[in-house]
Amino acid sequence: MTYARPALVLGIALLSLGRSVFSAEIPAHPRILRFPPSAFEVPMSDPRRIEPAPDTVAFVERDSLLPLIELTFAFRVGSHDDPRDRTGLAVLTGAMLTRGGSEALAPADLDAALETAGADLHSFVRGQRTAVRLSVPTWAAPQAIEILFDLVTAPRFDGEVLDVVRRSALERLDRRNEDPLDVLEREWTWLVLGRAHPAGRAPTTASLAAISRADMASFYRCFFRPEEMVAAISGDFSADLLGRIQKRFAAWGRLSSDRSECGSSGTGSTPADRASPARLRVGATSVAGRPPPPAGARVVLAPHPTPQAKLMIGHRLERPPAWNDPERFALLVAGEILGGGGAISRLNGRLRTSEGLVYRASADLELDAAGQEDFRIFLETRPERVWRAIELVEQEVARLRDELVHPREFEIVRQTLIGNLRSDFDTAEEIAGYLAENELLGRPPDYWRRYAQALERVGREEIRSAARKYLRPKDFIVLVVGPEGELLDQPEAGRIGSAGDRRIEILPRRHPGTLEPLDSKPGTDS
Amino acid sequence: MLPIEEIVLANGFRLLLVDRPTQSTVEAGWVIPTGSFDDPEGAAGMSHLLEHLLFKGTKTIGTRSYEREKPLLDEEDRLTAELERLPASGKRRQRRASLLEALSDVRRRATALARLGELSLHYSEAGATGLNAHTFKDFALHLVTLPAEKLELWFWLESDRLSNPVLREFHKEITVIGEERRQRIESTPGGEQDEAFEARFWGASNYAHRPLGRPPELQSISRSEARAFFDYWFQPDRLTAVLVGDLGSADVRKLAELYFGRLRPRNGRRAELAANAARAAQRRAATTVPDRTEPWRTNCACATQLRVLYPAVSFHHPDSYPLQVLSGVLNGRAGRLHRSLVVDRRLARSTASRLQAYRHEGLFALDAEPTGTHSPENLLEAWNEELSALHREPPAALEVTRVRNQLAADALRRLQDPAILRTQLLVYAGLGHWREIYAGPANLLEVTPGDVQRVSRTYLTPERSSIAFYQGPSQ
C-alpha cells in the first residue's frame, strides 16, 4: 500500500510510488492515500443456474466455511393476488405453509422436529412475492429439507393452527392505528395508488374472518408450484444432498391444466397474468373500472396524537425506465443524491446536518427491485417544524431539477452505489439470492455485472434530465401524520397549504377493523 | 473453531482479525466499553451524545481551518457558560438577550468554517458503506464496511478521530438527538411506558436510564463536560477493533502499529466528570426506591400486555447459561409458553422471555399480550403456574436437547454473515469477554435439566418480580 505526500504530488510523485507505508509516518491527510485497483467482479449467473427439474430454476452457491445450509423458495405470488373479498389470504397462506403442518407431520410435531434440528424456518409475504426460507446446520439438513418439501408440496393447513394465526392477525388489525408509521404507509398508498390498487387492498376484520381452509387450499393449488418460483440454495451442501433436493423438485406436481378455480373468486391475477411483464404495472391502468386517484399537488393531514410528525412527500412513479435503459441509472444517481443512504444525501445534509430538524430523512425510488410504483421522500420531525421541513424538501427537489450536480457529488454517489453492490455479494446466500432475484423479477442476468459500467456512462446532464422527467413537484402529494391542532396552529401552515392550487385536506380517523371513516369531518377520503 | 487472530499493541489497543478471502470487503468496527451506565450523575445521555459528536470531525477532518475555528468554539463555550450562570430573573433580561445574540453569531461563524459531514464523505468516496454507530448501556460501537483494498483509509480516519476529535456543531446535535428520542421512544406505541417501567425496576442503578438519556439533563451538558468524558474513558487500552473480511493484501499488524499505535493514554480525571451537582440532587430527590411487590399499572396507546422483570445475573456469569436455556424452554413454537398459553389455553396472543445480561447486572423478562377476552392479570396467573411447574420438576431431557441444539445453531448463524460476526465480536468485547464467541456455545451445551430447574427456583420467584400491566385503548 503506497501513498504520496502533498509536496511530492507537485513534481516528484513517481518517487513515492512503491514506497512502503510502514517505513514512513502517517500521511497528513487521507486524500493522499493511494490504493491498489479493485479486483471485484460480480459473480456470473451461468455456472450457478441449474434446472433441477423441467420448468424449475434454482441458483446454487457452495460455501463450506460453516456447517450451515440455506434454502429459499421465492414464489411469484403475494398480497396483490388476494381475491377482493379475501384480502389477507396471501399472508395467512404464507404463515400456514410454515406453521400449519404437512400431510406427514402434525403442527406440534413439526415445530418440535424443526427446533430440535436447530432449524430456522420462516415465510415472508410481500406484494408480489412469497418467500419460504430454511436455515439449518449441515448435520440436520437431510431431515429438515425433507420437512420443508413436505410442507410446500403437501401442506395440511391445520384448522387449529389457522385459528391461532387468524386470531393473531385479527388482533393486529385492532392495533393498526396506534403506530403513526403504519397510518402513514396505509394512507400514502391510498393517496398515491388508490384503494382499488392491489397494494391498497388492506385486510379487514370481515375479509380475514371469511377466509376458509378451502380458500387457502385453492390459492395454494393455483400459485405454489415449482414452475411458479425460483429457488436459492447456498452453504455447505454435498453433491448427494443436492441430488436429493433435485429429486424432490422432480416429484413435485406441476400446475393442473384445469385452471377454472384460479381467479374465480375475484383473484387479482392468475399465473398466466403473472407471466406477463405488464403485470408489474398492473396498478397503472386497472382496477375494476376505478380510476387512479387524481394527480396534482395536495397537502393532506392524517390526525394522530404522535409527538413527532411523520411525513411522506412524492407522487406516483409512472413507467420507470427499463432495466438496461441508461435513464434508469441516471435516475438511480439522482435519487441517491437527493436522499440515499450514503454521505451525499442532500436531504440529510440540509434537514439534519445544517438545520437539526430530523434524525432521518430519505428519498426512495427502489429502482434495483421491481414493482415500485411511487417516488417517496420520508422524514420525521417535531410538529412545529413540519412546514419548514416541507419547504426545504421542495427546495432540494427543485435544485436537483434545475442545477447540474457537482462532479464530486456524482463521483461519490457512484462509488457509494458500487460499494453497496460489493457488500451485497459478500456471502454465498447473497450471491444465490441476488441471482435468483434476477430470474424472479425478469432483471437481465448481466444486470449487476454491467452495473458499474452503466453508472460510469451516466452524465451530469442526464441526471438533471431524469430528475426533471421523473420528479414532478407540481404533482407532489404531501402527507403528514401528526397532531392536527399543533400542525395547523403554525403560521407557515397557511402559506404551504395555499401555495398554487393546494389546500390542506384533513383525512378522517378510521375504524381499525373496517378502515372506514369513524367521523364525518369535512375532508377527503380517497 | 473460528480462527480469530488477536493483536495487542504496546499501548494496550486490541485488534481482532477474521480473514475471509472470499469477501471483497472488510467489515470494520471498534468498541469502547463505555455506555449509558457510565453517564455521569446529572448527565444521562452523555455517552450517546459523544457517539454523535465523534462524527463531527477532528482538527484535520471537518474543518476549513481549525486555527480559525478554535477561538470561535472557545468563545461559544464561554458564552454558553455565562448564560448558564445568569439568573433567570427579569433583572438580567437585557444581558441574556445580548448573550444569546452573540452566541448565535459565533455559532454561525463557526459553522461557516466547518466542513459538515466530511468524515462520511471520505468513506463514501472510497466506496465504503454502512457508516454508523450505536450506543448501548455498557458500550458504544462504531461500524463501517470498506472495499478490502482501501482498508488503510479506515485506519487513518478512525485513529484520527480517536486521537483528535473536535466536538463541533454541539448544540445542533442535541436537537437531532431530541428527534431520535421522539422517534424511538415517544412516538413508538408503548415506548414511554417501557422506559418508565424499566427505570422503576432499576431504581437508583445507572442502568435505570436508556442511552438516549433524560432530555433536561442532556440539554444541560456542555462541550467541556463531553470532552472531559472522552478524555477520561477513551484510553487506548480500553478500545478493541474488529476486522472481518479479505485481509490478505494488507499487513494489518503494521497498519495497526502505525495508526492506532499513536493513541496515547489520556489525562482524564474522574473529578472533571462531575456534572452539575444540582441536577443530580434534583433527580435523586425525585427517584423513589422501587416497590417491587405492587404491580405497576399504566394506560398506553399500545397493546394491552403483561411485563414481568426479575433481577438476574450479569454477562458471563455461570448462571447466565442455564438462564438462556430456561428462556429457550419457554420460547419458540415448540416452547412451553406458546404451547400452553397461546395454543392450548388461548390466553395469549404472543409470549416471549429473555435474559438481558449487562456487564454489571442483568434481568430476566417475560412479555406477553393477552387475547381479546383475557386480561394481563389472567396471564400473570398462568405464567406463575408455568414457573411453579418448573420449580417442581426439571424440564425433560428432550426439551433441553431441543434448546441446546437451537442455541448452538443460532451461534453458528451469527458467525455466517460477516457484518453480524463483526458486530457480535464487538459486543462481546464491549461486555469485557470477546472469547465468549467460543465459550458461550460450549457452556450452553453443558447445561443440564437440573441446572435449569435450579436457576428458575433461584431467580424467578414471585417475591423477586416487578410486574407491569399495560392497558391499551378499548376497541
Image (cartoon, coloured by chain):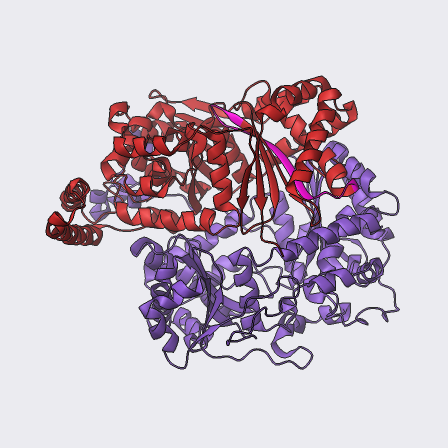
Chain colours: A purple, B red
- Give the quarter of the image for residue A106: top right
In the image, what residue occupies the spot 71% across and 25% down? Answer: B388
B402 in relation to B96, above or below: above
How far across and down, in percent of the image, does residue B122 sit?
34, 48
Span of residues in magenta: B344-362
Relative placement, left or right, of B56 versus A81 is left
- Res A345 seen here: no
The residue lying toward the viewer, choosing from A43 and B48, is B48
Residue B199 magenta: no
B183 in relation to A195, above or below: above
How many marks on residues?
0
How far across and down, in percent of the image, does residue B276 sit?
26, 33
- Give the quarter of the image for residue A491: bottom left
Relative placement, left or right, of B412 versus A458 is right
The residue lying toward the viewer, choosing from A260 and A508, is A508
In the image, what residue occupies the spot 35% across and 34% down? Answer: B283
Relative placement, left or right, of B244 versus A49 is left
How far across and down, in percent of the image, does residue A519 sit?
56, 70
- Res A509 seen here: yes
Residue B354 magenta: yes
Quadrant that contains the N terminus of chain B: top right
Quadrant that contains the C terminus of chain B: bottom right
B230 in relation to A163, above or below: above
In the image, what residue occupies the spot 30% across and 36% down? Answer: B160
The residue lying toward the viewer, choosing from A149 and B454, is B454
- Give the quarter of the image for residue A108: top right
How far across and down, in percent of the image, does residue B133 sit?
42, 41
Relative placement, left or right, of A57 versus A391 is right
